[in-house]
Image (cartoon, rainbow, N blue to C red):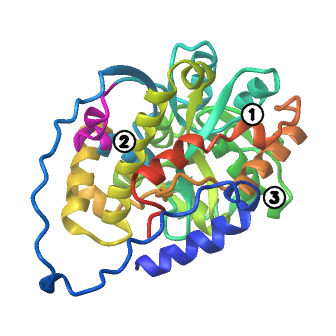
Amino acid sequence: MVTGLASLWRGVFGLFLTPLVACAPAAPAAPPTPSAPAAAQAPAPTAAVAPTTPPATETVRLGLLSSASDSGIFIALDQGYFREQGIEVEMTPFDSAARMVAPLGAGQLEVGAGSHSAGLFNAVARGIDIKLVADKGSALPGFGFQALVFRRDLVESGQLRNPGDLRGLRATVPARGITPEAALAHWLRPYGLTLDDLEIVELNFADHASALAGRAVEASVTIEPFLTRVLDLGVGTIYQRTDELLPGYQIAEIIYSGQFIRERPEAARRFMLAYLKGVRFYNDAFVRGDLAKRQEVVASLVRNTPVKDVALYDRMVMPGLHPDGRMNVTSLNEDQEFWLSRGLQQGRINFDDLIDYTFANYAVEALGGPYR
């Protein structure tokens, strides 16, 4: 299982990240092999361990959606990883990552746990200092935590068979110019449709189930855990998951405000160290199959997301979380081209200016090198 996903990371992300990964630090050298078997060597004297002064506690204001892709954050909170780094996280819920851009740019949030968007790219083009610093959710094969959903009654009646049948109908996404909308455009393209052929309704993910149940919309692009709620209520049917449509599609990121980077770089490093430690715990659970850790991850999600029924997690498809924080740059650029073509993005940006791996690189080194 580990070998398989490692191959996916090399195969999917390796194609996309060549310009940036080349700058990443090499893994630390392996320790030298002892010259004699350990049993034959004299035991080393016990060294006195100097007391370690914990870092002074700092508050970091975090905006998030409380979705399954926030698992790394919730694990880091519940396992005490932020606490051991002297970070107290002050969380503010948002209904869309696009609405985090203004408070991030104004320094009212230090960190955003959301997705890139046309609004974010426009802000960067205008000189707003915001950086994508780590992955927070991608559609690696087998980790399709986002899907196109059709209203169940329309599927059963035969009215909705594929995205080509959505012409003139209503589909909901949380906001315009964000990744669910870009994914919807990909689903429509093979059928000769564009977003202009549909009525796009903006509703936050938590309202998608009720909108489908009340027949206010005919389709939605939804992420976990809200997707499982739709299925559990029996109001929607999955047409296709994003990992089947666009394997490796970049959906969400950890976003730092420029003010946080400039004024509190040490806190920014410690936040990332705690976060990636949580992400690796997650990968131990869902990639390496550590059942005990899986139970702890599920417990964190039950505490911190709208899905409170433990049994539902046996049916949920979890997001892909890259254990070294790497992002799919080709996918980001494809979204940029789409938003430029729609007039939602006014100016092209350079991803070398947007992506800052400094903090993820620091965390990977502090954690002993790349996850294997």
What residue range appears in magenta? 76-88
Which residue is under mark 1? Answer: 118
The vertical placement of 12 against 72, above or below, is: below
Packing grade of label 2 (10 A; few <14, some 14-19, many >=20) is many
The vertical placement of 127 against 241, above or below, is: above
Residue 297 percent location from the top left of the image: 27, 53
What residue type is disc 3 on?
A: Arg
What residue type is disc 1 on?
A: Ala
Q: Is residue 235 visible?
A: no
* Front label number (3 vs 2): 2
Mark 3–mark 2 Cα distance, whole angstroms, equals 40 Å
What residue type is disc 2 on?
A: Ala
Q: Residue at x 83, y 53 (%)?
A: 193
Mark 3–mark 1 Cα distance, whole angstroms, equals 19 Å
Q: Is residue 221 left or right of residue 42?
A: right
Circle on res. 274? 2
In front of the other: 318 or 159? 318
Residue 45 percent location from the top left of the image: 10, 62
Mark 1 or mark 2: whose residue is earlier in sequence: 1
Residue 90 percent location from the top left of the image: 35, 21
Which residue is under mark 3? Answer: 189
